[in-house]
Image (spheres, rainbow, N blue to C red):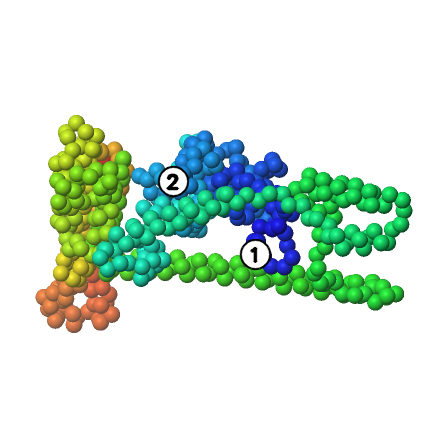
Amino acid sequence: MSCNSSVHGQWLCRRCFLSPSKSVQCVLCPNRFGAFKQVDDGERWAHVVCAIWIPEVHFANTVFLEPICNINQIPTARWRFTCYICKQKNVGACIQCAIRSCCTSFHVTCAQQAGLYMEIDENDENESVANEDVSNSASTNKYKKQPPKGSTRSPPPIRRRAYCHHHTPIEMIRSKTKGRTKRDESEEEALERIQKERMKTARKILAERRKCDRSVSVPVVPKEKMEAVLSKVTFSDRDNFFKRIQAYWTLKRMSRSGVPLLKRLQNQRSTKKKSNQGQEYTDKQLSQQMVQWRRLRQDLERTRLLVELIRKREKLKRDLIKIDQQVLDYQIRPLNVFLHHLLEQLEHLDDNHYFASPVDETEVPTYYKFITHPMDFSTMKKKIDRDEYSNLDQFENDFGLIIKNCHFFNEAKSPFYRAASKLRDKGLNVLKQARRVYETTHYDSETGQLKEESAAEDLNNTFEDRLEVLLERLKEYQAIEPRSKHVANLKKQIAQVRRTITKNLSSSSVNNTTNNDESIPLRTMNDESMETISSLSPNVSSLNVTKNQSELVDMQSTLQIEKSKLVESKNESDDNSTE
């Protein structure tokens, strides 16, 4: 009797090899079907899928996926959960729904039998810490021990997310239940009805599978085989002797849980070449074979390097596509990118996640009788994705609607009312800063893009305008936090702008003076009489003129340099006084 697991060739899994006839029980769930592996203590068994989905458990050998370790590291809370599919409590270790507000627990194999949505993604090395925290908040990581403060932790290689049938993504349900809706019901009712039917059938199948328990079945020697063996042997008390041998063989097989006394014969073709009798390898042949093996190893190493380079190249391609997508979003839908960032800041202010999702009607049935226009952060995120916000005012109205609904429905002393007031106070400061940024971007609500005039105006802004803007920002930051890093950075920028202004002024003044100086000798030459010029030789007159010009230019340039130095020293003293 085998587990009927499909594999290539003649192969026995660990459960069929060590316990082919005796059924085994999983430590982590109540089900007996599926692929099993031994625990590191050598006595207990567990499903491979259970060990993959429970975060505290891992495999000692990741190639052969055995043995399963750290069963004792599982928190006691997992053992006390009640599986909402099989309705069994204190049996195995359960995982929970990936939604933070949902506490539904279930066994891994029960979830697979019920067809729940379970997803495993590869976690990239360059992903942000925010994505890591979101993945750690899933059901499989709720009870994982956090590292001590000050220690650097690396992100997990994979992200595991499992959802109950209430929070399964609608797209996954639609893909599996096409054409199963009735005429008189809506799409949501049809999806809920189909999910309930799937849960009922899963419970029935699990109950039937638990009833049929596999008992120990030891093979029996056929009667024809016994007679054939007895016909070849003749001695006294032969029949009684063979009966005792058969009884010993049966007891031995039962004690070994049905494992044969001899190793199983594998009927596989041998890959070794038949060597000619009497022929031996000479030293020359052995050396040639060693050279061939080395070449083969070098070729395999080159192939491995090429495959690794291809993998890195494709990974870079994927990252570049993501960057191009982000750039395109910034160009085509700048307001949506701005609102997404603003919504993330507001969500961080909601510490208890009271306003993250819509109010559940089953928990608060009278909520929608009083609140006609409900609003929450998830609904606002969907509206951003659907391009329903054409300006910042609509976004602010929806945020105010969240606070208004909470104050209207809850009492003033309730924690929800106080949380809404706290969110309102902190959110107004965030919205004020966002309003300043929004007004300086010159956003066109009709086209959904930035105006071309804004870019031209930014390019045409002079350094004096930039200096005024920086000084205004410095006053604002000094009023809030006078010793912050932003204040120091603004002071550095102001000093740089002032230096560039002085340099531009000095260079422009030098050019003006040189142009004026070039016109001076011409005027002097025009004022001079022709008689003095004619009295001198041509060479002497030209030398005198050029000499006067060079002296005037040198004097004016030195004066201008001294003037620029005085201006720079004055600016530095102003910077020190502001600091």
Q: Please report whichever mark, 2 or 1, sits nearer to the chain's N-terminal start.
A: 1
Q: What residue type is labelled 2?
A: Tyr
Which residue is the extreme one toward the top? Answer: 413
Kind of element beneath mark 2? loop
Q: Is residue 140 left or right of residue 336?
A: right
How many labels, in total?
Answer: 2
Q: How crowded is mark 1: few (under 14 residues within 10 Å), some or many (20 or more)?
A: few
Report the residue marked by disc 1.
Answer: 6
Q: Which residue is drawn at 49% across and 59% down?
A: 311
Q: Indicate the quadrant containing the C terminus: top left, top right, bottom left or bottom right.
A: top left
Q: Along the line of sight, which residue is nearer the eye, 561 or 231?
A: 231
Out of 554 and 47, give the one closest to the viewer: 47
Residue carrying label 2: 84
Q: Which is more toward the observer, 112 or 351? A: 112
On the image, the x and y values in percent for residue 328 come to: 28, 60
* CB within 8 Å, label 2 to label 1: no
- x and y percent of residue 84 in the render? 38, 40
The x and y percentages for residue 253 are 70, 43
Residue 187 drawn at (x, y percent): 25, 56
Residue 164 picture quarter: top left
Q: Which residue is drawn at 41% across and 45% down?
A: 203
Identify the secondary structure beneath mark 1: loop
